[in-house]
Amino acid sequence: MRVFAGLPLPADVTGEIAAWMRGWSPAALKTVEREHLHITLHFFGEQSEEQVRKLVECVGAVTHPRVEAVLGGVGRFPPGGQPRVFYVSLARGGEQVEAIHRLFEETIARLGYAGERRPFRPHITCARVRRDRSPEPPPSFGRLAGWTFVLDRLVLFESRLTPRGPHYHPLQTALFD
């Protein structure tokens, strides 16, 4: 089973981000579907049923206060050279999301999972660059910058790959206080 842990976004935020992405070039960019917009904490990839059961327990044990977050601007990975991913950053709330990430990483480390080598940067992936394409930069984030919202849960998702794209199914949810 292919799984990841993430922080889902409220529907009004995903709706506004999806509307902002509508004008992007489909030839150069594969945009993320509205219902898949989230902040990833850890991508596990393929896991056995036993490993997934343990991850379900880990997610269920996470406690944290809700996070008031504010959308920032548009960024890209890597920061220099040809972009592979465009994302939206957090102008506020990033430090609290980093704290949730550290807490979760400490919890899963007890199960033998190694953390990422790259530093964690809270972000919302919006689009991936199609191979051999040079996309135009996304339009200005405009009125969405500064949008305030609340992150109120951590979810362990199963990601089922289909010919039409991934389908996410929540396996366990930890509601924040």
Image (tube, rainbow, N blue to C red):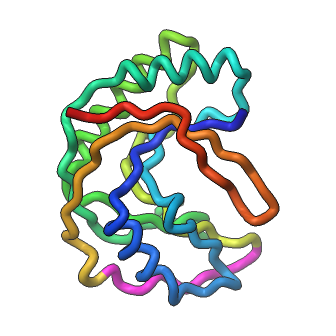
Whether residue 81 is visible = no
Observer-nearest of 42 and 171:
171
Asked if the magenta segment contains residue 154, the reply would be: no
Where is residue 149 drawn, in percent x and y? 22, 59
Q: Where does residue 154 sit, x and y in percent of width and height?
A: 39, 37
* Bounds of the magenta segment: 132-141
Q: Is residue 26 left or right of residue 140?
A: right
Q: Residue at x 75, y 51 (%)?
A: 161
Q: Main secondary structure of the magenta part?
A: loop
Residue 8 versus residue 154 in the image, above or below = below
Q: Left or right: 52 with respect to 153?
A: right
Does the image show residue 150?
yes
Q: For this rendering, which residue is in front, 107 or 162?
A: 162
106 in relation to 1, above or below: above
Measured along the vertical axis of the image, is residue 133 above or below residue 102?
below
Identified at 53% across, 41% down, the residue is 170
Image quarter where the C terminus lies is top left
Of all residues, the one furthest to the top in this rendering is: 110
Count the numbered circles shown: 0
Identify the residue shown where x is 18% and y is 50%.
68
Looking at the rendering, which quadrant does residue 97 occupy?
top left
Quadrant in which the N terminus appears? top right
Question: Is 85 left or right of 79, judged from the image as shown?
Answer: right
On the image, the x and y values in percent for residue 78 come to 53, 60
Residue 70 in the image: above or below residue 94: below
Image point (51%, 85%), residue name: 22
Rendered image quadrant of residue 83 = bottom right
Residue 130, how many percent across, how many down? 70, 72
Q: Please state which of residues 81 and 42 is positioned toward the viewer in this rendering.
A: 42
Tell me if residue 140 is in the magenta stretch: yes
